[in-house]
Image (tube, helix red, strand yellow):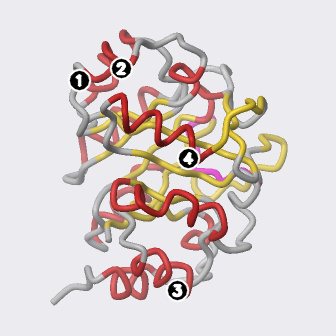
Amino acid sequence: MEIWPSLDLMGGKVVRLVKGNPSKSIVYSDDPLKVALKWQRARVSGLHIIDLDATLQLGNNIEVIQKIVKNIDLPTQLGGGIRSIRSIEAAFKLGVEKVIVGTALFTNKLDPIELLKFGSNKVVIAIDHINGQIAISGWRTKLSLKLSSSIQKLWNQGFRLFLSTSASRDGTLKGCDKSHLMKIEKFLPYTYIAGGISSLEDLRFLKNKNVKGAILGRALYDSVIKIEEVMEVAGLAKS
C-alpha cells in the first residue's frame, strides 16, 4: 500500500481544513519545503499536494509548488483548481507526476476523451463525497450523484486512478468512512483513500482491502500516528 502525506497549501503555508472549511484552518508550517523534505526522509511513496487557494479561487501557490517539486526526489500528485486542459499542461510542466481532477469533470468542463489523452496513469479522478453523495467545488456543492455509480461510470470511460475523500471525515480524526468504501470495494486497488484516517487500525483495514494508497494529513501532523508506524503497517518500512 502506498503512503502519500498531504501538503495542503494556503497562503504559502501548510494547513489542514476541518471538513473543508477555510474558516477552520490549522496552520502546521510556514515552510512547505521543509515539511516535504521531512516526508522524503521517511521514504514515503510520494507527496499529495493540494492548492487550496486555487480550489477556492482565492489565488494559487504555484511558486511554492514549483520550489517543492524542484527540490525533492519524490513522485508528486497535484490537485486544486485544475479545471482546464491548459491548467493540466501547466501542472505537468511543473514536474508533477500526476494531476488530480474532480470538479471540472463532473461539471462537463473537461472532456473525458481529451483528459485520457494524458494517460490513464497520469490523471487521478477525485471523487469527493459527503455520506456517499458527490461533492464538488471544495465540497461546497453537492450533486445528485452517488459514489458507487460515479466510479463505475468513470471506470467504463477508461479512467484507472481514483481518489475517494470523505469530506464529512476530512480533518476530523474520526476514522475512515468504511461503510461507503465497501460500496466501491472492487475499485479499491485503483483508489487512494483520504479523509478521517486516524489510526493504525484504519490503515490495516485499508491494506486488507487492497487499496492502492492512503492519503494522510492531520493524523500525521498532530502526531496521532507516527510515520514510522504508518510505513510499517503499509509494508514500506526501512530494511
Q: Separation of disc 2 and disc 3 at Cα?
A: 34 Å
Q: Which residue is mark 4?
A: 8
Q: Position of residue 225 (x, y in %)?
A: 55, 83
Q: Residue at x 30, y 67 (%)?
A: 44
Above-or-below relation of 69 to 55: below
Decide which of 61, 216 is in the foreground and name it: 216
Quarter of the N terminus within the rendering:
bottom left
Label 4 with label 1: CB-CB less than 8 Å: no
**Residue at the disc numbered 1:** 118
Whichever of callouts 1 and 2 sits on the residue coming sooner in the sequence is 2
> How many neighbours does mark 2 have within 10 angstroms: few (below 14), some (14-19), or many (20 or more)?
many
Task: Give the number of the disc on residue 200.
Answer: 3
Which amino acid, mark 4?
Asp
Q: Residue 63's spot in the image, x, y percent?
A: 41, 28
- What residue is pinned by disc 2? 88
Residue positioned 64% across, 61% down in the render: 180
* Amino acid type at mark 1: Phe
From mark 1 to mark 2, how far is it between C-alphas? 9 Å
Q: Which residues are magenta?
A: 11-18
Q: Which residue is more in the foreground, 182 or 108?
A: 182
Report crowding for label 1: few under 14, some 14 to 19, many 20 or more residues within 10 A (C-alpha). some
For marks 4 and 1, the one nearer the N-term is: 4
Name the kind of residue labelled 3 in the image: Leu
Q: Amino acid at mark 2?
A: Ile
Query: Is 42 on the left-hand or right-hand side of 207?
Result: left
- Compared with 34, 66 (above or below) is above
- Secondary structure found at label 4: strand
Relative to 54, is 238 on the left or the right?
Answer: left
Q: Position of residue 234 (x, y in %)?
A: 34, 80
- Image-quadrant location for residue 77: top left
